[in-house]
């Protein structure tokens, strides 16, 4: 492996990785600042792998290619084209269509990803293989998805994936979560000095100090800044200027060097920079004989580029940017026009080049751009779609078409990305383009989302969208994307409005569709709008959809299905998809998708007892709404914060947050936010023993004996209502509510709800029937998955058994409930379980926190006494008098809340770790 100044440890690390990858399969992501030497290390790793006899595939991500589907994969797999024949027919055809080697409908992403994984494994079976991806943050989304998939499926092969990405920048679409990472730091001071001296031994001392201070250990800056400084009029007494962002300084340096190249070289470099792949054949075709590849020689000599594997490779992305910056707009347009003529068989790339080459309005080019936008939308590339549509609008000669395209871009920006501010600007442009803008359903949907985020009144927004649908000539067409998006938007508005009459207007719009609504929309409505009445019958369709999701990577499908699973407790089935959206959102992906995924995971975490993670994600979601997008949805994350503080006994905080939600929701007509806020208020009342208040709050959401129409949250407070009714001597109302739950077959919706229905029935039943009903509840499947709900049922059962004087059985249930509450940190319920245990004749074992209150000597005496030794025997062991031991035990027992040595023994045995001792 080559020698790099100051990088011996890094080279050894990569050498070990290459050996492991080419023996057993592995992936590694190297990150670091621009110019820190990632490319040099990747080159060294590739050279080492080549020396081992491995096949080395190279990919260089570029901003230009990032807009073109499968462009990076095309670079990577081009050398393996002849091996495509070894794939199955379906895999080969999918890969050929994806990479532009064949025709046909767009292939499924999973099929393409599997084809890539199989191809690499087959190639590695012949010779070890290393795929090197530089600037992975810039590769296109389709390629990123496939490579993310492959990176996790290399184990057991002889193939490795080595990727490099910028630190602290938008990380693009490549999913790095869970992959090994290596952070490349700047060079230490001594190594930076050696590198500078090795390349510029005659550099003046003042200039040397200036370069070292400015470069801050960045190798590329150390090599490039002296060249720029040597061309300027410098004086040794000149003060070092304030440090600017490194990229700006390097850009100026490269721009100066690129601008001094011969014209033919600059034109060829410009074509390479705009073309993206640097493929020599494409550059020659675009030149049409105007210049030759040999014209690159001055740029190679000046070390701006190198020719590698029949491609022009820029030594740094900033060199590429500088090349573009030093040209005129006319020169760039001519280059784009030439490239558009070369890539006629690549529609998206051709559309982009045509759009950049065109100045005057041109409907043909606008149509080409719009067609390309549909292709990228099908892959979930929302940013590219908005960019293509906006450019198509710019080139639209017809004001109505310009308005329509801007409205569609606004809708995608608002709905998929959560960018309501930019969406509002696009809507304003759409209105200026045509007075008929508001007739577009995309315009109406985007306007609704913008108004929602701008604190508009929910009922007014809902009415405007209903009116737009009623007046649209497309309103009967279920195949029209504008109609479908308007219906999804109306479903969102109906949900947050939380009123039956709002939902009914959506049903009217759906009923007039000639072919009926899309299945996913119907399924989501059946399980999300009013699952009490339509959920059970929809469950088989949900099962089928979830099974199909295993072969589906579309983010929209996964997130809409998450809505369908929420009230039937099946979010775990889509959790992996949701986490993918969270990771992409954290790395700069669509904020709206990020928020929705966080909402759903928080729900699942609360029910499954992952309260710490739920709190972290709620804080993350709130930060996204405050600093990125989706300000309207801040209430949802405050709801989770109120919920978590309620069950932990932080009543003042919980009630303050919940009341904040209530105060915000009222003027805006967001009744669902009000309903959600009632749940933490009810739990806070139950935890503090204010059962009267809990009953009134719960019945305000859904009256006793009734499961309110289109208020799915009534399912989550049903057991709360029953418990509050029983504890306030309203057993008749409790039993009526249980009958309503049973008649609605709520237990069939999910195992968790089945446990809650059975537990509610036991709570409301006469004492003589309760025992059998509690046992039925606690014999249901999946008890271990819902710790808080099950512990509450056990607590209620233990209380019933204690009252019936079945003390041994009571203690069994109460101990299990107490252990669960302690693990969760549900302090109010912990205190209740402890009181019940004491009343059942068994003091609960002290916690580690209580043992900390003992001195070192007291703890030692406690251990010996718990082991069965008498006071006299303990005294002999510790060289104390028996009376002293007796006095210590007299003080120890009250500290721990126990009264017997047996309880002391049980308490010590139950501790997970030895407690830390206080000093004497």
Image: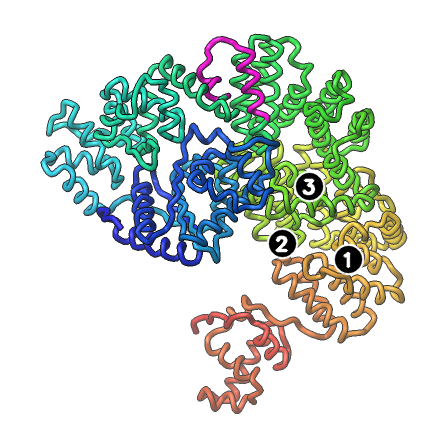
**Disc nearer the start of the sequence (1/3):** 3
Q: Which residue is found at the position 32% from the left and 30% from the top?
A: 318
Q: Which residue is found at the position 50% from the left and 26% from the top?
A: 346
Which quadrant of the structure image shows residue 622? top right
Q: What residue is pinned by disc 3?
A: 561
Q: Which residue is found at the position 57% from the left and 26% from the top?
A: 413
The residue carrying pointer 2 sits among few (fewer than 14), some (14 to 19) or many (20 or more) residues within 10 Å by Cα, namely: many
Is residue 656 something one can see in this rendering? no
Frontmost residue, 467 versus 909: 467
Frontmost residue, 456 versus 155: 155
Q: Which mark is residue 648?
A: 2
Residue 483 location in percent, x, y?
Answer: 71, 24
Q: Is residue 3 above or below residue 316?
A: below
Residue range in magenta is 351-374
The residue carrying pointer 3 sits among few (fewer than 14), some (14 to 19) or many (20 or more) residues within 10 Å by Cα, namely: many
Give the label, 2 or 3, closer to the camera.
3
Q: Which residue is found at the position 78% from the left and 28% from the top?
A: 506
Is residue 374 something one can see in this rendering? yes
In terms of secondary structure, what is the magenta stretch mainly? helix
Secondary structure state at the residue bearing disc 2:
loop
Q: From mark 1 to mark 2, how far is it between C-alphas? A: 22 Å
Q: Is residue 616 above or below residue 457?
A: below
Q: Is residue 367 magenta?
A: yes
Q: Is residue 448 magenta?
A: no
Give the label, 1 or 3, closer to the camera.
3
* Label 1 close to label 2 by CB (< 8 Å): no
Give the label, 1 or 2, closer to the camera.
1
Secondary structure state at the residue bearing disc 3:
helix
Q: Is residue 748 left or right of residue 596?
A: right
Q: Which mark is residue 755?
A: 1
The residue carrying pointer 1 sits among few (fewer than 14), some (14 to 19) or many (20 or more) residues within 10 Å by Cα, namely: many
Q: From mark 2 to mark 3, how far is it between C-alphas? A: 31 Å
């Amino acid at each position: 492996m080559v020698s790099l100044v100051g990088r011996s440890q890094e080279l050894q690390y990569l050498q070990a990785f290459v050996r492991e990858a080419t023996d057993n399969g592995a992936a590694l992501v190297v990150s670091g600042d621009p110019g820190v030497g990632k490319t040099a290390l990747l080159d060294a790793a590739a050279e080492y792998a080549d020396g081992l006899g491995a096949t080395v595939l190279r990919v260089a991500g570029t901003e230009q290619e990032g807009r073109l589907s499968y462009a990076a994969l095309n670079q990577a797999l081009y050398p393996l084209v002849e091996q495509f024949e070894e794939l199955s027919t379906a895999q080969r055809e999918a890969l050929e269509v994806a990479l532009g080697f064949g025709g046909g409908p767009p292939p499924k992403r999973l099929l393409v990803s599997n084809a890539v994984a199989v191809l690499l494994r087959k190639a590695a079976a012949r010779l070890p293989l290393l795929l090197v991806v530089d600037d992975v943050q810039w590769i296109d989304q389709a390629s990123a998805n496939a490579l993310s998939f492959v990176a996790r499926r290399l184990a057991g092969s002889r193939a490795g994936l080595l990727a490099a990405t910028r630190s602290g920048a938008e990380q693009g679409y490549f999913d790095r979560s869970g992959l090994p990472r290596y952070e490349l730091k700047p060079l230490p001071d001594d190594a930076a000095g050696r590198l500078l001296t090795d390349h510029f031994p005659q550099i003046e001392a003042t200039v040397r100090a200036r370069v070292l201070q400015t470069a801050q250990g960045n190798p590329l800056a150390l090599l490039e800044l002296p060249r720029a400084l040597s061309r300027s009029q410098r004086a040794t007494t000149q003060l070092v200027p304030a440090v600017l962002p490194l990229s700006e300084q390097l850009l100026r340096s490269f721009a100066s060097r690129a601008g001094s190249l011969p014209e033919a070289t600059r034109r060829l470099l410009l074509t390479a920079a705009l073309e993206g792949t640097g493929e020599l054949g494409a550059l020659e075709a675009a030149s049409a004989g105007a210049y030759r590849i040999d014209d690159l020689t001055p740029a190679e000599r000046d070390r701006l580029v190198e020719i590698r594997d029949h491609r022009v490779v820029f030594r740094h992305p900033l060199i590429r940017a500088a090349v573009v910056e030093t040209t005129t707009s006319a020169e760039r347009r001519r280059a784009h026009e030439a490239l558009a003529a070369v890539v006629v068989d690549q529609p998206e790339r051709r559309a982009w080049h045509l759009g950049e080459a065109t100045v005057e309005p041109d409907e043909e080019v606008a149509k080409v751009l719009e067609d390309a936008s549909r292709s990228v939308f099908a892959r979930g590339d929302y940013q590219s779609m908005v960019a293509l549509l906006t450019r198509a609008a710019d080139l639209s000669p017809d004001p109505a078409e310009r308005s329509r395209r801007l409205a569609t871009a606004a809708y995608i920006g608002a709905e998929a990305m959560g960018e309501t501010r930019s969406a509002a600007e696009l809507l304003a442009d759409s209105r200026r383009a045509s007075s008929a803008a508001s007739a577009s359903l995309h315009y109406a949907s985007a306007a609704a989302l913008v108004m929602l985020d701008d604190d508009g009144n929910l009922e007014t927004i809902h009415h405007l969208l209903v009116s737009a649908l009623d007046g649209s000539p497309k309103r009967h067409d279920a195949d029209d994307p504008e109609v479908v998006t308007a219906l999804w938007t109306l479903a969102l508005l109906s949900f947050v409005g939380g009123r039956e009459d709002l939902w009914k207007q959506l049903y009217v719009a759906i009923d007039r569709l000639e072919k009926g609504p899309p299945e996913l929309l119907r399924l989501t409505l059946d399980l999300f709008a009013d699952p009490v009445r339509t959920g059970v019958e929809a469950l088989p369709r949900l099962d089928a959809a979830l099974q199909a999701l295993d072969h589906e990577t579309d983010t929209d499908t996964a997130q809409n299905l998450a809505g369908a699973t929420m009230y039937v407790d099946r979010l775990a089935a889509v959790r992996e998809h949701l986490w993918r959206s969270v990771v992409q959102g954290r790395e700069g992906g669509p904020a709206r998708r990020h928020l929705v995924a966080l909402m759903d995971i928080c729900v699942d975490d609360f029910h499954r007892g992952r309260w710490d993670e739920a709190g972290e994600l709620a804080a993350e979601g709130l930060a996204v709404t405050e600093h990125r997008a989706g300000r309207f949805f801040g209430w949802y994350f405050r709801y989770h914060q109120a919920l978590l503080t309620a069950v932990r006994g932080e009543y003042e905080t919980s009630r303050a947050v919940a009341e904040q939600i209530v105060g915000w929701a009222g003027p805006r007509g967001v009744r669902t936010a009000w309903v959600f806020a009632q749940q933490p208020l009810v739990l806070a009342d139950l935890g503090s023993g204010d059962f009267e208040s809990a009953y009134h709050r719960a019945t305000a959401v859904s009256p006793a004996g009734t499961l309110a129409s289109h208020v799915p949250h009534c399912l989550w407070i049903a057991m709360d209502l029953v418990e509050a009714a029983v504890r306030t001597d309203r057993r008749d109302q409790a039993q009526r509510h249980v009958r309503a739950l049973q008649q609605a077959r709520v237990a069939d919706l999910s195992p968790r709800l089945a446990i809650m229905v059975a537990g509610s029935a036991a709570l409301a039943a006469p004492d003589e029937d309760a025992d059998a009903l509690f046992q039925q509840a606690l014999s249901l499947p999946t008890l271990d998955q819902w710790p808080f709900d099950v512990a509450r049922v056990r607590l209620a059962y233990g209380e019933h058994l204690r009252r019936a004087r079945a003390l041994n059985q009571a203690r069994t249930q109460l101990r299990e409930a107490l252990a669960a509450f302690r693990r969760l940190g549900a302090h109010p319920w912990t205190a209740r379980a402890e009181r019940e245990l004491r009343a059942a004749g068994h003091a609960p074992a002290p916690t580690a926190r209580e043992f900390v209150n003992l001195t070192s000597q007291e703890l030692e005496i406690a251990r010996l006494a718990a082991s069965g030794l008498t006071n006299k025997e303990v005294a002999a062991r510790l060289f104390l008098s028996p009376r002293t031991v007796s006095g210590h035990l007299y003080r120890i027992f009250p500290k721990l809340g126990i009264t017997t040595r047996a309880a002391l023994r049980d308490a010590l045995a139950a501790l997970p770790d030895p407690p830390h001792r206080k000093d004497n």
